[in-house]
Image (cartoon, helix red, strand yellow):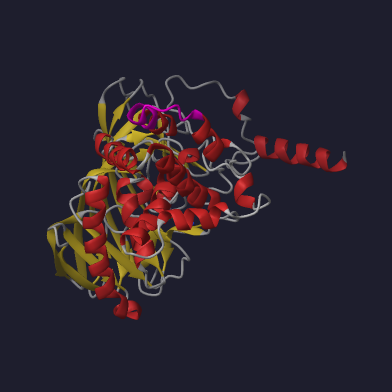
Amino acid sequence: MRSLAVVTVLLSALACSPSGGSAAPTPAARPPVQDAGAPGIGDRDFPLDGNGGYDVAHYGLKLGYDPGRRFLTGTATVQASAKQALSRFNLDLAGLTVDQVSVDGAKATFDRKGDELTIVPAAPIADGARFTTVITYSGRPQPVKDSSNLGTYGFIPTQDGAFVTCEPNGAKTWFPANDHPADKARFDFEITVPKGLVALANGEMSRPAATSGGKTTYHWRERHPMATYLATMTLGKFELRQGRTPAGIPNLAAADPRFRSALDRLHTNTGKITDYWATVFGPYPFSSTGGVVDDFPAGYALENQTKPMYGGFDPDESIVAHELAHQWFGNSLTIKRWRDLWLNEGFATYAEWLWSEHSGRSTAETIFAGFRARPASDPMWAYPPGKARPGDLFNESVYTRGGMTLHALRKAVGDQVFFKLVKEWATTNRHRHVSTEQFVALAEKRSGKQLDSLFDAWLFQPRRPA
Ligand code: ARG
Ligand code: ZN
């Protein structure tokens, strides 16, 4: 009873103190604002991630970073279209100081609360209208340090620059964003850093690097839609290896000098694995491939679009195979809500097993059987991977049991149907959003089999499938 009462008091205290201060009225007491965009995009597990009422088409990010002072200056030009009439709307932004905001060239007023930047344009935006918001801002970016299993992510300052990996919601640590995968957009980056440093972002260089006044500016363009968590501006001292994959896709590998010895192998493996996945999953969805090894010991890799980042280790083929498979599953085909994360991680994990099989090491069946043999008491069986939990998003089940789900499907429908189905899934949904229900429906259609109970047992039951 006692602890319950304490919890209640705490909860009501939280509800009554928006960061504006104790004198502010409670949200309920404030009159509703007509035509306000919602502060979240509608993912009930991440209620304040992303925003409602508009859809971003393009981010133009002009950024400067001084590693000595750990100071970022930015101008973000966000082109969006309104999905409702908007008297105000939000972007996600964590920390940093906003200096000025304009909407369609007219000065706008703005307000900050927590990680929500609320913008009130001089004139309301009509439903369906395209509008351009320009935000100038600056400050010392702080990464997110999560106490659950997300670790440290977002803009992470390093000795010589920054390691920028943002899954699930760390883009807001370095630019104002509709920071949820349900809103993908195209990106242009213009990044100015001290001479001698390299700034790496997604896509390809849209202009040659230019140095003047002791600074170098890099222009990068990702011309395919991209989720905000896949954006990067990783910078520092880097050695580069440029070329093409054997099949001809531009391929850029970069390594911090401490990982110089990893560079050639990363470049070669990235090339051959990108090409192999194109034969299994269908044409590569982007205009270049690559990989970056930095010296920040993140303890994880992230599949940043066109440039997976490996945090402080020399990646083996297996993890390169994983991150490159994400270019299809996660990056080209993107989830609308985080609970469907197995569609990213289960596929990328299964791709590791396929790569092992392809390389003449253990077959997917052998790997599957090894996991299948875990005792019924193993925590993986208690966690249904089809419902990734916000506090435990990257649980092993989402990866391993997610991958096992695909192997169980493969056994149920046969190799021929399975591989045709996977390729069709990736090809017909290229650059779009996907859901578990759509995958189940396609699997049933192509196999002509009732697969409800298979998917239910593997994805949604808190026990080991029979
Ligand atoms: N998607 C990444 C991978 O499986 C993992 C990202 C982990 N992110 C984090 N904040 N811990 O390769
Ligand atoms: Zn992954």
Image quadrant in which the N terminus is located: top right
Q: Is residue 417 left or right of residue 168?
A: left
Residue 304 percent location from the top left of the image? 33, 55
Number of numbered tags placed on the structure image: 0
Residue 166 makes an appearance in the image: no
Q: Is residue 319 left or right of residue 197?
A: right
Image quadrant in which the C terminus is located: top right
Name the residue: 37% across, 43% down: 177
Q: Is residue 286 left or right of residue 40?
A: left
Is 234 rendered above or below residue 255? above
Name the residue: 61% across, 34% down: 24
Residue 383 percent location from the top left of the image? 60, 45
Magenta segment includes 448: yes
Magenta segment includes 339: no
Residue 465 percent location from the top left of the image? 58, 41
Quarter of image, res 70: bottom left
Is 405 rendered above or below residue 202? above
Residue 389 percent location from the top left of the image? 57, 43
Name the residue: 44% across, 25% down: 36
Q: Nearer the viewer, residue 67 or 41?
A: 41
Is 34 rendered above or below residue 90? above
Residue 466 makes an appearance in the image: yes
Magenta residues span 443-452
Q: Is residue 401 left or right of residue 358?
A: right
Quarter of image, res 320: bottom left
Magenta-colored segment: predominant secondary structure: helix
Give the residue at the far right of this rendering: 1
